[in-house]
């Protein structure tokens, strides 16, 4: 059986959310980061790594009791690529890794399973990226064989620049599920998410 782990990025400064840490906002009755991590745990068959940085103690407290491995990125203020790097340096044991964001509460287990199926139906040696038109989504699927190459560029680690520079090593999958493309960065985005969630609950 193909093995999948996950690296969840939860280190950002949450600047656009004002004085609140978006990952701790209430989502489905629990902190957002806990809801997102539980979604990944319900799908993957290997370990989940959560990369922390800003307010790491609060994030870890929100995840208490879950079977996850915490990776603290001391260089979190340098940006997301360095959180990806921190996760990739620690991740071991799986054949493939979903690298996702902690602020995508619309993602469902079904969405993740659909991406995994698309990856397995394609070239499993390439990085799989969900797309809707020209919009790139998250998570991406990284084969373990690509870890060393993604870490080779010390100044620009991670997937973004690498897949732009090496398009032949990535494959795009058309995905229609909104969860891949919705992240919560601002109070307005969180309000919109809450309204849509309430409507779903009423139907």
Image (spheres, grey):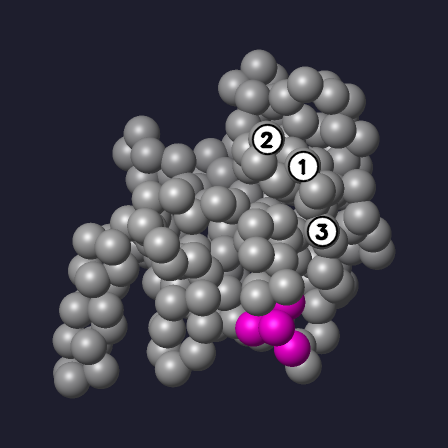
Name the residue rendered at 33%, 51% in the picture.
17
Visible in this render: residue 69?
yes
Name the residue rendered at 56%, 73% in the picture.
62
Q: Determine the CA span between mark 1 and mark 2.
A: 6 Å
Relative horizontal placement of residue 173, taking residue 121 as reference (left or right): left
Name the residue rendered at 52%, 71% in the picture.
34
Judging by the rendered image, the residue that carries numbered circle 1 is 75
How many C-alpha atoms fall within 10 Å of the one at disc 1: few (<14), some, or many (≥20)? Answer: some
Relative horizontal placement of residue 160, taking residue 201 as reference (left or right): right
The residues colored magenta run 60-64
Q: Which mark is residue 78?
A: 2
Principal secondary structure, stretch drawn in magenta: helix
Q: Determine the CA span between mark 3 and mark 2.
A: 14 Å
Residue 56: in magenta span: no
How many C-alpha atoms fall within 10 Å of the one at disc 3: few (<14), some, or many (≥20)? Answer: many
Relative horizontal placement of residue 149, taking residue 18 as reference (left or right): right
Report if the CB atoms under discs 1 and 2 are less than 8 Å apart.
Answer: yes
Judging by the rendered image, the residue that carries numbered circle 3 is 72
Name the residue rendered at 33%, 34% in the picture.
135
**Residue that extends furthest to the top in the rendered view of this protein:** 165
Residue 154: image quadrant is top right
Disc 3 is placed on an element classified as strand
Q: Which image quadrant: the C terminus?
A: bottom left
Q: In front here: 115 or 187?
A: 187
Q: Position of residue 100 (x, y in %)?
A: 54, 50
Q: Earlier in the sequence, mark 3 or mark 2?
A: 3
Q: In front here: 92 or 103?
A: 103
Q: In front here: 68 or 129?
A: 68
Disc 2 is placed on an element classified as helix
Q: Determine the CA span between mark 3 and mark 1.
A: 9 Å
How many C-alpha atoms fall within 10 Å of the one at disc 2: few (<14), some, or many (≥20)? Answer: few
């Amino acid at each position: 059986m193909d093995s999948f782990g996950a690296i969840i990025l939860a280190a950002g400064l949450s600047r656009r959310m004002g004085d609140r840490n978006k990952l701790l906002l209430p989502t489905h009755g629990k902190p957002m980061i806990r809801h997102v991590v539980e979604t990944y745990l319900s799908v993957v068959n290997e370990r989940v790594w959560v990369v922390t940085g800003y307010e790491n103690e609060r994030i870890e407290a929100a995840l208490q009791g879950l079977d996850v491995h915490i990776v603290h990125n001391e260089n979190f203020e340098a940006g997301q690529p360095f959180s990806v790097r921190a996760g990739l340096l620690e991740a071991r044991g799986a054949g493939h890794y979903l690298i996702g964001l902690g602020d995508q509460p619309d993602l469902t287990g079904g969405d993740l399973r659909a991406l995994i199926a698309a990856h397995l139906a394609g070239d499993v040696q390439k990085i799989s990226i969900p797309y809707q038109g020209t919009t790139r989504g998250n998570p991406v699927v990284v084969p373990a064989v690509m870890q060393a190459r993604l870490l080779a560029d010390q100044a620009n680690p991670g997937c973004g620049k690498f897949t732009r520079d090496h398009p032949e090593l990535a494959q795009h999958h058309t995905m229609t599920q909104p969860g891949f493309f919705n992240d919560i960065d601002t109070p307005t985005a969180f309000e919109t998410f809450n309204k849509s969630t309430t409507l779903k609950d009423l139907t």
